């Protein structure tokens, strides 16, 4: 009996140490509203510079739509994504005009990221042609495209290469299981 209570106490101690008992997990409405306001401010700057996109406007609108449903954490995530995209677009526009904003994106790296995404999409389509597309491959490609929009090219390349590998593996898996059927002993029981 002592061993059980000791192991339960040890488990409780480990959980208390690894899971903080604070409100850090929860996001508050005020935080979400602040993130949305910041995203709108950056969007207005982008609009004034003539580089505003419908994509960021849609992200901000979606974030605002989550407020009544108390989706504050997701609203903050979407607002930050919109803000980051517009900041990246502004930095590129400013760098192109020599305004001393952020350094311009390495065009070779951007081309590499776009090629990696194209290769991943081709591998995904090839796997889908034999009904071997894996569940998350399309999602990973979309995430890689979003990373390119925000200027995170290294992460985009990694994500696209992982999606490409999933496409290749899905294709190979589908071909290897093409003629697979139930074993004869299973089919005999079904009769």
Image (spheres, rainbow, N blue to C red):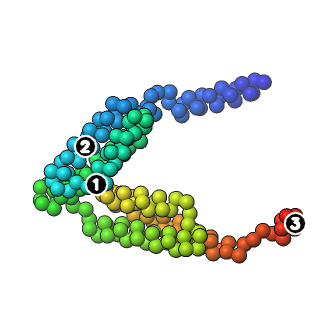
- The secondary element bearing badge 3 is classed as loop
| Image position of 122 (left or right of 183) | left
**In terms of image quadrants, where is residue 131?**
bottom right
In the image, which disc is placed on residue 54? Answer: 1
Q: Position of residue 155 (x, y in %)?
A: 39, 58
3D distance between C-alphas at marks 2 and 1 = 13 Å
Depth-wise, is mark 2 or mark 3 nearer the camera? 3
What residue do we see at 41% from left, 42% from top? 74
What residue do we see at 56% from left, 63% from top? 134
3D distance between C-alphas at marks 1 and 3 = 59 Å
In the image, which disc is placed on residue 191? Answer: 3
Name the N-terminal-most of marks 2 and 1. 2
- The secondary element bearing badge 2 is classed as helix
Q: Position of residue 121 (x, y in %)?
A: 45, 69
Toward the left, the furthest residue is: 98
| Image position of 178 (left or right of 114) | right
Rendered position, 39 above or below 123? above
What residue do we see at 42% from left, 60% from top? 142
Q: Residues within 10 Å of mark 3 (few under 14, many from 20)?
A: few
Q: Which residue is mark 2?
A: 40
- Quarter that holds the C terminus: bottom right
- Quarter that holds the N terminus: top right
- The secondary element bearing badge 1 is classed as helix
Q: Residues within 10 Å of mark 1 (few under 14, many from 20)?
A: few
Depth-wise, is mark 2 or mark 1 nearer the camera? 1
């Amino acid at each position: 009996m002592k061993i059980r209570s000791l192991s339960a106490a040890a488990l409780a101690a480990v959980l208390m140490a690894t899971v903080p008992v604070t409100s850090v997990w929860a996001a508050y409405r005020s935080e979400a509203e602040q993130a949305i306001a910041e995203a709108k401010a950056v969007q207005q700057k982008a609009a004034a510079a003539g580089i505003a996109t419908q994509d960021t406007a849609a992200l901000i609108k979606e974030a605002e739509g989550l407020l009544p449903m108390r989706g504050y954490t997701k609203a903050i995530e979407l607002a930050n994504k919109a803000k980051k995209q517009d900041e990246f677009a502004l930095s590129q526009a400013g760098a192109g005009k020599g305004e001393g904003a952020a350094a311009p994106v390495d065009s070779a790296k951007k081309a590499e990221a776009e090629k990696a995404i194209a290769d991943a999409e081709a591998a995904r389509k090839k796997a889908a042609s034999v009904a071997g597309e894996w569940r998350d491959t399309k999602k990973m490609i979309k995430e890689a495209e979003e990373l390119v929009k925000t200027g995170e090219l290294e992460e985009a390349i990694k994500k696209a290469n992982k999606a490409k590998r999933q496409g290749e593996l899905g294709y190979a898996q589908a071909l290897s299981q093409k003629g697979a059927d139930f074993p004869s002993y299973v089919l005999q029981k079904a009769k």
